[in-house]
Amino acid sequence: RINPPRAARSEPPILLGLDLAHAAGNVPLSLHDWGVDFAAWCTYKYLNAGAGCLGAIFVHARHAADDGAYPRLTGWWGVPHAPGPRFEMRHGFDAAPGAAGFACSNVNPLMVACLLASLRTLRDAGGIQAARRKSRLLTGYLELLLHEEELTVPRAAAQAQPARCGIRIITPADPRRRGCQLSLRVLPPPPPGGAEAESGSGPPGAMRELEAALLSRGVVVDAREPDIVRAAPVPLYNSYEDVRAFVLRLADALVELARRWEK
């Protein structure tokens, strides 16, 4: 929750800038209405434009004429055109209002085509509001299945059941405080003989081993140091059946991981 008007009334005014790398294409944004001064984001994540594709910025309308107030890289493409003096080749820098004035050069048209295709897909799916509704349901379903399958509790070997590592969900449980992704901490299995399980996470590299085990089962996640695997059921192309299949394969991979650690 943010209150930019209060920040704007402070002396000197506090500028509010947001990093929206994991928000653009993931959750609805109303940057102008919220009074955010500026923001930046990438398009290769939840906007699905592809690795290395375009980044983007937002500058609030109240800063549209502040071209001399803030440092920036200046370039010819930041001068307005049609209408505007870009081709008059004036001395000095006539910045276009707002975010356009921060452009340095023309963007790569092939990257624009990738982003355009993705944005059209999002539009045809009903827009960001519809995607967000499905996202909350998918991620909630994933969280539910992880608990129902008892994967959040490491399991010791007993009778016909092999030992199994567990995971701890470290993403907030409140759907309003998360996007579609769940971050999962890898937990070691309890020691044999009914001893109490150790607290903390698995050995170094555990998340890489789990990532590889899932990849061998046709599931793509990503690992983050020191012990996190991130799973994101994306509403544009993941289904409830995908979520169920992931949980079943995760359970199998956690058994394999426990077997490796026993050795």
Image: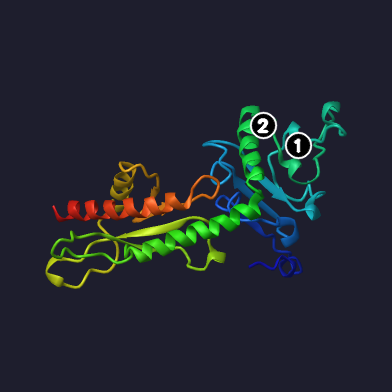
Residue 234 screen position, x and y as percent: 51, 49
Say the numbered circle drawn on residue 107: 2
Q: Is residue 80 left or right of residue 50?
A: right
Residue 231 seen anywhere in this rendered image of the structure: no
Where residue 186 sits, quadrant-wise, is bottom left
Q: Is residue 75 left or right of residue 220?
A: right
Gap between marks 1 and 2 measured at Cα = 12 Å
Residue at 80 percent across and 37 percent down: it is: 93
Residue 131 screen position, x and y as percent: 60, 52
Label 2 Cα neighbours within 10 Å, binned few <14 / some 14-19 / many ≥20: few
Element at label 2: loop
Residue 165 screen position, x and y as percent: 26, 59
Q: Is residue 242 left or right of residue 118?
A: left
Sequence-wise, the earlier of marks 1 and 2 is 1
- Give the answer, above or below, for where 24 lies relative to 55: below
Residue at 66 percent across and 52 percent down: it is: 39
Name the image quarter holding the N terminus: bottom right
Residue 114 seen anywhere in this rendered image of the structure: yes
Element at label 1: helix
Q: Amino acid at mark 2?
A: Val
Say the numbered circle drawn on residue 78: 1
Q: Amino acid at mark 1?
A: Gly
